[in-house]
Amino acid sequence: MLITILVSAGVVAAVGLVLGALIGFTAKKFEVETDPKIEAVQELLPGANCGGCGYAGCADFASAIVTKDTDPSGCSACSDAMLAKIAEVTGKAAGKKEKMTAVVFCSGSFSRSTQAADYNGILDCRSASIVAGAGGKACRFGCLGYGSCARACPFGAIEIRDGLAVVHPELCRACGKCVNVCPRKLIRLVPASAKIHVYCNSLEKPAKRRKLCKNPCLACKKCIRTDENHMQMQAGLVRVNYSNPPEPGFVEQVKCPTGALQLEEMHRKIEALKPAAPAPKKEESK
Amino acid sequence: MNIPVKTWRFHGGVHPADGKALSNSVPAQRAPLLERYTVALQQNIGAPPKPIVAKGDVVKKGQLIAEAGGFVSAPIHAPTSGTVGDTVEVPGANGGTIPAIEIIADGKDEWGSGLEPIPNWKNTDREILKKRIAEAGIVGMGGAAFPTHVKLSPPPEKGIDTLILNGAECEPYLTADHRLMLERTEAVLEGAAIAAKILRVDRIFLGIEENKPDAIAALREKAGAYGVTVVPLHVRYPQGGEKQLIYALTGRSVATGGLPMDVGCVVQNVGSCAAIRDAVVEGHPLIERYTTVTGTPVVNPGTWILRLGTTVEQALTFAGGVKERAAKVIMGGPMMGFAQTSLGVTITKNSSGILLLQWKETSGYTSNPCIRCGRCVRACPMKLLPGPVSVMVESENYDEAERNYVMDCMECGVCTYVCPAKRPLVQHFRRAKAEINAKRRAAKAKQA
Amino acid sequence: MSEEIEKKTVVLPEPGSLVLSTSPHVQDGDSISKIMLKVLVCLLPAVIASIWFFRFNAVRILVYCGAFSVFAEYAWSLAIRRKPTVGDFSALVTGVILALNLPPGAPWWLCMVGSVFAIIVVKELFGGLGQNPFNPAAAARVALLVGFAGPMTQWAAPVTGELVSGATPLGAVQLAKGSKEAMAILGSPENLKALFLGNVGGSIGETSALAILIGGFGLLCFRLIKWQIPLAMIATIFVFSGIVHLAAPELTPGPVYHILSGGVMIGAFFMATDMVTSPMTALGGLVFGALIGVLTCVIRIWGAYPEGVSFSIVIANALVPLIDRLCYIRPFGWHSHSASALQIRRGEIK
């Protein structure tokens, strides 16, 4: 009995040794020369493989930085400190880049917008948007609130609060994944220095907007009249002039009649303070 | 004609509780004249028609108010005499909003279409007949709303030899075509004969499900005089799907991505045939249609002859409103219809029915994992693999879904109907088709 | 008529309260839990037969396996913080089928190990119902047979409950190998009748072919299983073992003996036909059944184990994705010259 155990253990050990030696030999023999710099740069990149740089993941981008002189600042997810370290490794100065952040241009949470119907289907924005009348909210331009962007975000920077996507700018690395996934095209990357945004994307007739939402931008242009340098019209929507964003005090100054012009932190906070209405109702299900 | 015709059995299909008994014995009623009609300006597949009237214009019943916006387009006519009101936006049955022209009725309801009747169509040039059908704004009234004159102009090399009339009405609850075939039998048959003359075919089949014995008897009595063969078909959804119907009647299968004319067939809805006859023989453009207003919550379910531009709200009022709470208002049937969020949707050329369902009759959303029972595979009339493909779509693997022919899905809904795990399969496929189409468009734009 | 309507107050559905969803708006009433309940009903004849033949032992094993399976599923749901899925009855079905596959002498801990293995390792670790590549009951039986050969062969004579070893019909075949005469005795009509009714030794639920046939008939009537799988499996075993019997009568008894003995019946109707682990297409079902049949015969006639049904089912389960791929059905209207076929050939659809 004992001898059997010993023999089998010995055989397994021997096979393991031989195979291990083989692997070691092939690894040495057929080694592919790689630039150690690529590995070093890859270590410094965020490793989220978000694809925001346009390359197939961080490893691909790292080799592009080293071999093709691509500007490492193309990685929007890198902090400035990391970029400086990458520049040290490659010996080339990194270009300056402005920190960007994603903004969801809507403030119509479930409790603050009119519901046209109870949506009863796949809880995903892209799936909901193909149903006639999409979602349940009456507004045809607002956030659907089923979290496609939150699921797409590799950094967990988007949260769905009461049926509205809100971005946490401190987590957002501006990779742009959410921008492409939103079926309503509500999300834009803007300079993180802007702290005020007009949280509305509606192109509905202004008279109708009030019926659909508690915080619509009615395009009254009060803010533009207050300061033409900071605010502007863009394709029918009032937007902050992101090349010259206003100071946080601007909100107090304007006193937007509907509250569509909001501080970024208020946008997040108010959602949290509001009693969360039950997400898409499944009432009457007996 | 009573000659038995060989029929084929298409793959799969289901037999849902049909609910037709609610309304199939009620004679169609003509809706009373309304004070105001809201005529939607997009009632066909293809280019939207261009409005040619301005606010304040006086129009006659049947007068052209929007001309065709291209070859694949159909003009729109005033449903009654009166004055043109505002241009408003109405919710579309398939979502979104569409512009619409209001017609404020003057109560006289005077005809003035400007189309001369052609009672002697047998000796009239085919092109004149075809032009008349285009002028009358006739589209496929079964649901797709494809302009009829385009269907009747197949390239000569296709060798069209069969005209198929679609009277299957396989959707549960709907009885509009049933009542139409029963009450306007000769109009349907004469319209078919006109279409056959235009197409130069002498083989005309009328496919009809066996659950309409009175309509079959009525049609058979008169069909001989018009050279139409009435073929009763098994009651199985989707018997009225275009490809399924062609297969059932001729044994020819339309290739994936192909059109019926590729196998020498043209399919016309019976409603469109009756409209063709009215346009040619009477000179009346398409301004009204048979529409079923039904469902257990409806007080008086039945079929109504509604003018285009009637809102769902008005149609429901004709039917006496609801007696129980309705959870869903559906334009069309329960298998392929669109759930509506408002009652402001208007009757268009392809509104075959308004169906109200109570909560307990509808299917609530749940989605359990696929247990691979294979019922969807057995039921799919397009012989796809709905279950596995839905899993691919769930993981956003659209390439794999495309390889598994998701684009051939016609969204008939039988897979979702039979799924014991209650998976929203059709919604997955709609999404996959939308994403793949977007991808194809992007690829095309890149090439150009 | 119309004036009359307008005078009355007409109630209309209120907008805003309507439900929005995609078509279809109706579904037939079947659900996973109803399917599983129907399977349980179809298992009843086999359960009754097992209790009839093995008395208290059968009750004991059925209760243990059922309870442990349901408990394992519930505990797993709690552990991964998922809504408990016990309500779909799939765990109970697995437990009962596993119990029917255990010998009458199986101790309580064997039931527990088998149930937990079936539910946690075979089913839940792969993602739960619908994701498991192997039939939980078959895989658990294989695991127990390999891991606990002793307790798994605690056979007992039916009715008396007396513990005996090697007293199963297939054990007898193993002993009779090489002797034409012994094989002939095994294949005698009296023997076959006992096999058909179930008055023989073996796992508690697999002995009575009659009871399983009744249940299988129920499954077919409820349209819960593909008829192709049991048909192909039984027919293949019949043909294969028949040929071997004719060629070498000392090696194996007649084909009917093979079909009626061991786990062929319960395997064919209840384990191979498991929806999750069998091919989806009709042709795939035929291939799958035939594959199990061949493997079973090979293991029984030339293998070291007297019985091979559960091994064959597990091996065939592993090949299901391949079978599904090879037996792929083409969409309606698919011709080798159709548009999508050409696109595939040109590489436009990868």
Image (cartoon, rainbow, N blue to C red):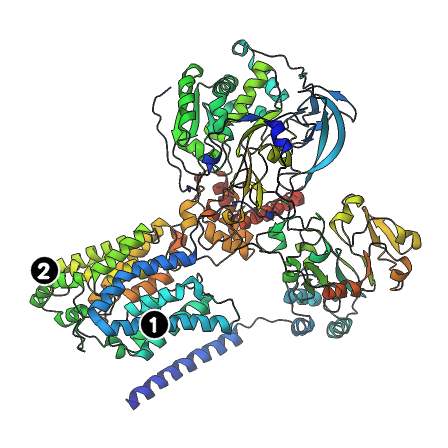
Q: Which chain carries label 2?
A: C
Residue pushed farthest bottom? A2
The circle on residue C110 is none
Q: Residue at x 34, y 72 (%)?
A: C65
Q: Can residue B133 be seen in this view?
A: yes
User: Residue B284 appears at what percent x and percent y?
Assistant: 61, 18
Task: Locate residue B40: give its quadrant.
Answer: top right
Q: Which residue is drawn at 41% across and 26% down?
A: B214
Q: Which residue is denoted by mark 1 in the rendering?
A: C65
User: Residue C186 appears at what percent x and percent y?
Assistant: 11, 65
In the image, is A269 to the left or to the right of A12?
right
User: Residue A55 appears at what percent x and percent y?
Assistant: 66, 61
Q: In front here: C187 or B109?
A: B109
Q: In front here: B310 or A229?
A: B310
Residue pushed farthest left? C181
Q: Which residue is drawn at 29% across and 54% down?
A: C218
Helix, strand or loop status at disc 2? helix
Q: Which residue is denoted by mark 2 in the rendering?
A: C189
User: Residue B31 appears at what percent x and percent y?
Assistant: 60, 27
Respond whether the residues carrying marks 1 and 2 are from the same subunit: yes
Q: Is residue C188 visible?
A: no
Helix, strand or loop status at disc 1? helix
In the image, is C14 to the left or to the right of B300?
right
Structural crowding at the residue carrying mark 2, measured as other residues with C-alpha within 10 Å and reported as few (<14), some (14–19) or many (≥20): few
Distance from disc 1 to disc 2, alpha carbons, whole Å, reads 35 Å
